[in-house]
Image (cartoon, helix red, strand yellow):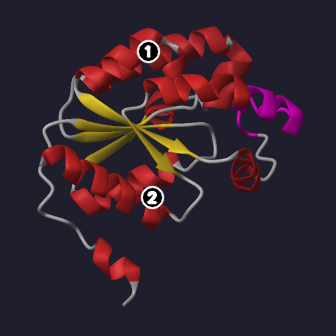
């Protein structure tokens, strides 16, 4: 049987919390968020896209023009606003969990699912995507990856193996959700 057939909208999922996707750039947060939203009927918000829509600037341009510190202020406001909503999926930027206030906001009404991919998977997915503001070269990205790893793990309610297909990642998230609901 084709596994994708099993991923038709699951109407048995009735949650009273937000699903928050965290993880390093390239782990699949945006793609998983979109796919999962179709599966469970939640609206998905990607914090980077939300900021881009609000400012009319790309994240890269915000970094270039105003710097990372200013972007993090915008990100904090965005996360606070989105966290006050119910029954949504929030796909965070890779650095969102570095701010403890963001983590508190996200956890007040949500469960954090870390999409944990190994470094080789991240690099193959990014494929030298230099449009990402903190991606300068493989060495700088590796350093950042390992600097953030412990923080991702400490803030997660659930850790999901993100070295697999989007469909399988979503299945794993849904299986964790069903355990919570029991």
Residue 179 on image: x %, y %: 21, 50
Structural crowding at the residue carrying mark 2, measured as other residues with C-alpha within 10 Å and reported as few (<14), some (14–19) or many (≥20): many
The quadrant holding residue 124 is bottom right
Q: Residue at x 78, y 53 (%)?
A: 127
Residue 177 on image: x %, y %: 25, 49
Q: Residue at x 46, y 48 (%)?
A: 160
Quick check: 4 above or below 147?
Answer: below
Residue 61 colored in magenta in the image:
no
User: Quick check: 120 left or right of 40?
Assistant: right
User: Quick check: 105 left or right of 26?
Assistant: left
- As rendered, which of 128 and 160 lies closer to the eye? 160
Identify the element where label 1 is drawn: helix
Residue 42 on image: x %, y %: 23, 49
Kindly report the distance in space between the C-alpha atoms of the residues bearing marks 2 and 1: 27 Å
Identify the element where label 2 is drawn: helix
Instruction: Tell me which segment is drawn in magenta.
Output: 131-145
Task: Tell me, yes or no, if residue 35 can be seen here.
Answer: no
- Image mark for residue 169: 2
User: Quick check: 64 left or right of 19?
Assistant: right
Q: Can you identify the residue that label 1 sits on?
A: 76
Structural crowding at the residue carrying mark 1, measured as other residues with C-alpha within 10 Å and reported as few (<14), some (14–19) or many (≥20): many
């Amino acid at each position: 049987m084709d596994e994708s057939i099993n991923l038709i909208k699951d109407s048995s999922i009735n949650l009273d919390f937000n699903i928050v996707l965290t993880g390093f750039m390239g782990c699949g947060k945006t793609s998983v968020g979109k796919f999962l939203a179709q599966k469970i009927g939640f609206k998905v918000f990607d914090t980077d896209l939300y900021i881009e829509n609000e400012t009319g600037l790309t994240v890269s341009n915000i970094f270039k023009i105003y710097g990372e510190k200013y972007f993090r202020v915008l990100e904090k406001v965005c996360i606070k606003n989105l966290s006050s909503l119910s029954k949504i999926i929030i796909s965070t930027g890779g650095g969102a969990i570095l701010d403890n206030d963001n983590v508190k906001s996200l956890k007040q009404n949500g469960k954090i699912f870390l999409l944990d991919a190994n470094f080789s998977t991240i690099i193959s997915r990014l494929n030298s995507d230099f449009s990402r503001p903190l991606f300068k070269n493989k060495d700088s990205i590796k350093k950042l990856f390992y600097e953030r790893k412990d923080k991702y793990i400490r803030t997660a309610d659930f850790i999901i193996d993100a070295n697999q297909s989007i469909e399988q990642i979503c299945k794993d998230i849904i299986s964790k959700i069903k355990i919570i609901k029991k």
